[in-house]
Amino acid sequence: MTYLLSQEVKEALKNNSPVVALESTIITHGMPYPDNVAMARSVEDDIRAAGATPATIAVLNGQLHVGLNADQIEALSTATAPLKLSRADMALAMVGGKTGGTTVAGTMIAASLAGISVFATGGIGGVHRGAELSFDLSADLQELAQTPVTVVAAGAKAILDLPKTLEVLESFGVPVIAYGQDELPAFWSRTSGLKAPLRLDHPEEIAKAHHMRAQLGLSGGQLIANPIPKEDEIPRDVLTPLIEKAIREAEAKAITAKEVTPFLLKTILDLTNGKSLVANKALVRNNARLAAEIAKHI
């Protein structure tokens, strides 16, 4: 079979119970051990407490899993050189017997394959700064335009070019919906300075929009931009100069391509004295709780 369902997820889908997909690059690449295991378990527990079933998605030894047990999460969190799997490389990793965490795009593909309509993550990828020269755009954007999954995130990662990311999503016909406010959130911050194209205030409205898109025969999903809780945010006026400083450091050290994002995140972690990691954990859990509420109405 192309994918394996955990027993918990299998029973939930069989009973038409709400299920929320979760990515696994936060386990393989987002946090060090044992923080990654603790984070994965707390997010799953939040979803269960909200009345839904979590389905963490990953590839283990070439097998695509939709739903992981505790031992599998532990194994993934300590895997040696795990891959980061998106649309381009998931199939090759599977036929090659590899292990890896799924990105937003990879998780959307697997969720849709398994019949899961809602997915919670931290932040999506987007258009990188300087993309007019590098053409560096995340595969997450195209996936949102073609795979019918509702993705709950705290916006795009704040180190990206947010205006260009929004422009590309609009060009691709992806509904970008701010939850409970008029302005787009910016990952660690509740505000970005950008007005959201759309706004919804209730999980059931989001679920209805998901169903209506299916009835209209529209491809793609919808992005729910859920602001980080106020008590956990790093305000934009505090964060922006730190991001700019981190970018200048990356340029001075000639850091390019795939090394840019890890460098910026590590630098911002240092510049905020660890506050960015605390905020990251809070926003992921906040997104998981909202995703569970949406899933209960789908």
Image (tube, rainbow, N blue to C red):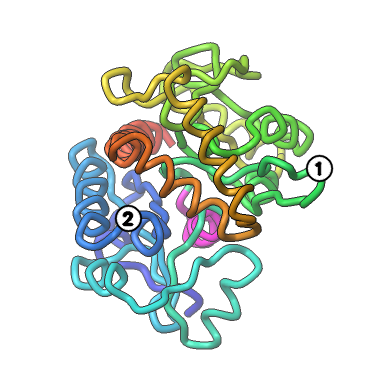
Span shown in magenta: 106-116
Secondary element type, mark 1: helix
Decide which of 137, 176 is in the foreground and name it.
137
Q: Assess disc 2: are there few (<14), some (14-19) or many (≥20) residues with their C-alpha within 10 Å of its C-alpha.
A: some
- What whole-number distance in Å separates the C-alpha atoms at marks 2 and 1? 30 Å
**x, y percent for residue 134:** 77, 52
Residue 31: numbered disc? 2
Comes first in the chain, label 2 or label 1: 2
Farthest bottom residue? 96
Secondary element type, mark 2: loop
Q: Assess disc 1: are there few (<14), some (14-19) or many (≥20) residues with their C-alpha within 10 Å of its C-alpha.
A: few
Identity of the residue drawn at 28% across and 49% down: 53
**x, y percent for residue 150:** 52, 40
- Identified by mark 2, the residue type is Met
- Examine the rendering and report whether any part of residue 296 can be seen: no
Farthest front residue? 252
Q: What secondary structure do most residues of the magenta stretch adopt? A: helix
Identity of the residue drawn at 63% across and 39% down: 214
Farthest top residue? 182
Q: Is residue 112 magenta?
A: yes
- Label 1: which residue? 132
Identify the image quadrant of residue 9: bottom left
Residue 165 vertical position relative to residue 17 in the rendered view, above or below:
above
